[in-house]
Image (cartoon, helix red, strand yellow):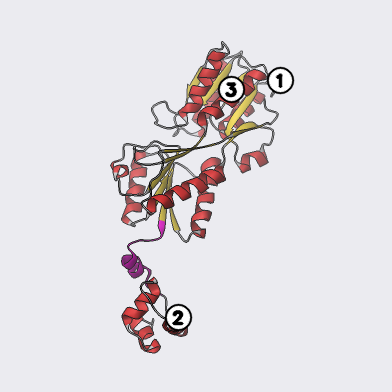
Amino acid sequence: MKPKLEDVAKLANVSKTTVSRVLNNRGYLSQKTIDKVNEAMEILNYQPNSAARQLFQQKTEIIGLLFPTVANPFFGELIQDLERKLYKEGYKVIIGNSMNDSEKEEYYLNQLLSNQVDGLIVGTHNRGIQQYQKDNLPIVAIDRFMNTDIPIIESNNYYGGQIATERLIEKGAKKIVHTTGPSELETPTHRRMQAYTDTMKKNNLDPLIYHLDFNISYEEKNDIFYRIFNENPDLDGIFASNDIDAIMLMQIAVSLNKRIPEDIKVVGYDGTELIRYLYPNLTTVVQPVKKIADKALSVLIQRLKEEKTEQEYILDVYLWEGTSS
């Protein structure tokens, strides 16, 4: 029969309240009493009721992570790093994979809140969901504008877009296409597109932007990428919004008998460890995944402690100089 708290109290010759105080580290107790209770729990192989402890402490030690997809290498590495760091801090993690679907995101958000998570780290797109407007819920956003109360962790998107475009121009490209996400999203990543546009105009070149929906299949995306080449036969430079798109575009270019970088120069974005290991020749803007995870966690802990936080935290990026540009 599973031992109860009363059994521990009886064996240790203390009250149930004393056992509860030992379990929850509340109030003053002598070391002798603490040792007696711990010894009794060990003898009985007593497992504390975590739900009861959570109710007593008014926290669950659970953090929710809500992101668009774990398939994208950037989000995959970020989630992996966040989970590892949260575990070291003593938190359990629940992950929601919204697939850029607002209904699915709202469902996951409600599930997370019903589990009474202590806080959330989100990288999803749908700002309008009502639950995000709760001022008392500790939330940290990554690369997303949620509301004025939720702090944002981001890399320096404008500088990243600038150095990517400058790299292509310095290497001689003039007809440069930029692929990016939907224009209606409210995200700091649009600053990459703004930097691309500003840098092109500064060099008397015409910006050429293709917006891609996040929910399209690889087949649909492949068709759009082929269309980019068909519509721009004199294309000689590509600044892709992420490394997967950059690699797909390079493969299509090669299938069309274009040489990289002689005919077309390509720069990607994100620069995860996986991509740099598998495609070291891809020139890409590297986002500091580990630093983003560190900052997100430290800001979330500040929020959990009800400490004041900034609205934005912007981290440095750098160019990985491959041979694709």
Comparing labels 3 and 1, the label whose residue is closer to the camera: 3
Image quadrant in which the C terminus is located: top right
Of the pair 71 and 143, the residue shown nearer to us: 143
Query: Distance from label 2 to label 1 (Cα)?
Result: 74 Å
**Horizontal side of residue 156 vs 234, given as left or right:** left
Mark closer to the chain start, 3 or 2: 2
Q: Which residue is labeled 2 in the image?
A: 31
As for residue 50 lying within the magenta part, the answer is: yes
Comparing labels 2 and 1, the label whose residue is closer to the camera: 2
As for residue 60 lying within the magenta part, the answer is: yes
Image x and y of residue 247, in percent: 61, 31
Q: Is residue 108 visible?
A: yes
Image height of 201 relative to 181, above or below: above
Quadrant housing residue 230: top right
Image x and y of residue 148, in percent: 34, 37
Image x and y of residue 37, in percent: 42, 82
Query: Distance from label 3 to label 2 (Cα)?
Result: 65 Å
Classify mark 1: residues with Cα within 10 Å, few (<14), some (14-19) or many (20+). few
Image height of 163 relative to 301, above or below: above
Q: What residue span does the magenta drawing correspond to? A: 48-62
Mark closer to the chain start, 2 or 1: 2
Classify mark 2: residues with Cα within 10 Å, few (<14), some (14-19) or many (20+). few
Looking at the picture, which amino acid does disc 3 mark?
Thr
Looking at the picture, which amino acid does disc 2 mark?
Gln
Image x and y of residue 183, in percent: 42, 25
Q: How many marks?
A: 3
Q: Which residue is labeled 3 in the image?
A: 165
